[in-house]
Image (spheres, rainbow, N blue to C red):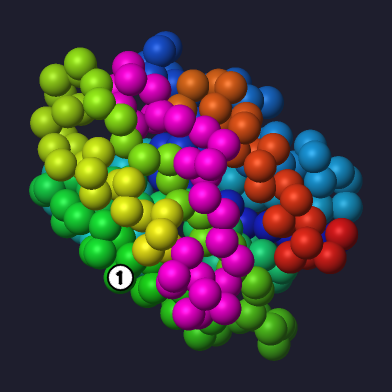
Amino acid sequence: MKTVLCYGDSLTWGYDAAALGRHALADRWSSVLAAGLGEGVQVIAEGLNGRTTAYDDHLADCDRNGARILPTVLHSHDPLDLVILLLGTNDMKPVIHGNAFGAVQGMERLIELTRHHAWSFEQTAPEILIVSPPPLCETANSAFAAMFAGGVEQSAMLASLYRDLADDKGCGFFDAGSVAQTTPLDGVHLDAENTRAVGRGLEPIVRMMLGV
């Protein structure tokens, strides 16, 4: 049995901008990925609304700093064969960091934490797959437009920057924006079809990295 950890934010949690709730379990990209991979692979979804790569959100009601929480999550689910990192959207908020370069620095920190983690049972570090989130789009939702001011331009840079980081660090890479688009309802999240598309798009590269 292979085990995959999907570490992400609301795109992994499955936020539904239309219903202001959560997508059905079967529609979340991690569930679609699990169904495609079959019974020989366990896919663990660890998504949290508002999670950043490595930055504090002092307005949040819980710890949104992905770097601070990651070691605990790794211990909770080890042994792991693959860690998928789909983060960076919330780093685009000016109150958090506000630019793509900051997200790259945060993603690099997550890679280092995974590679140098104190794994149980002397297991080797898992493979890492960096996933760039679909770029933000323009929206008439004034609250989200203000919350992510400047994010449309900055988020469009993430795919190329994450690809370079993956090449430099020897990680896998997938551009979720190649198969999915954010909804103009809020400019940030994915509708059900687009979140399913991410799961389908990930399946081939995950199979390759797991050797299944």
> Magenta part of the protein: which range?
163-189
Q: Farthest residue in the top direction?
A: 19
Count residues near mark 1 (Cα–Cα under 10 Å), then give few for <14, some for 14-19, many for 20+: some
Does the magenta portion include 87? Answer: no
Does 6 sit above or below residue 208? above
Task: Decide if residue 48 is in sight here.
Answer: no
Query: Amino acid under label 1?
Result: Gln
Q: Point out residue 140 in the picture as x, y percentages from the top left corner.
A: 20, 16
Decide if residue 166 is on the left or right side of residue 87: right
Decide if residue 52 is on the left or right side of residue 1: left
- The structure residue drawn at horizontal position 57% and vertical position 78%, both measured from the top left corner, is 170
Q: How many marks?
A: 1
- In the rendered image, which quarter contains the C terminus? bottom right
Decide if residue 171 is on the left or right side of residue 133: right
Task: Decide if residue 49 is in sight here.
Answer: yes
Q: Point out residue 186 in the picture as x, y percentages from the top left corner.
A: 29, 22
Q: Helix or strand or loop: what does disc 1 sit on?
A: helix
- The structure residue drawn at horizontal position 42% and vertical position 12%, both measured from the top left corner, is 19
Q: Which residue is mark 1?
A: 105
**124 or 75: which is nearer to us?**
124
- The structure residue drawn at horizontal position 79% and vertical position 56%, both measured from the top left corner, is 207
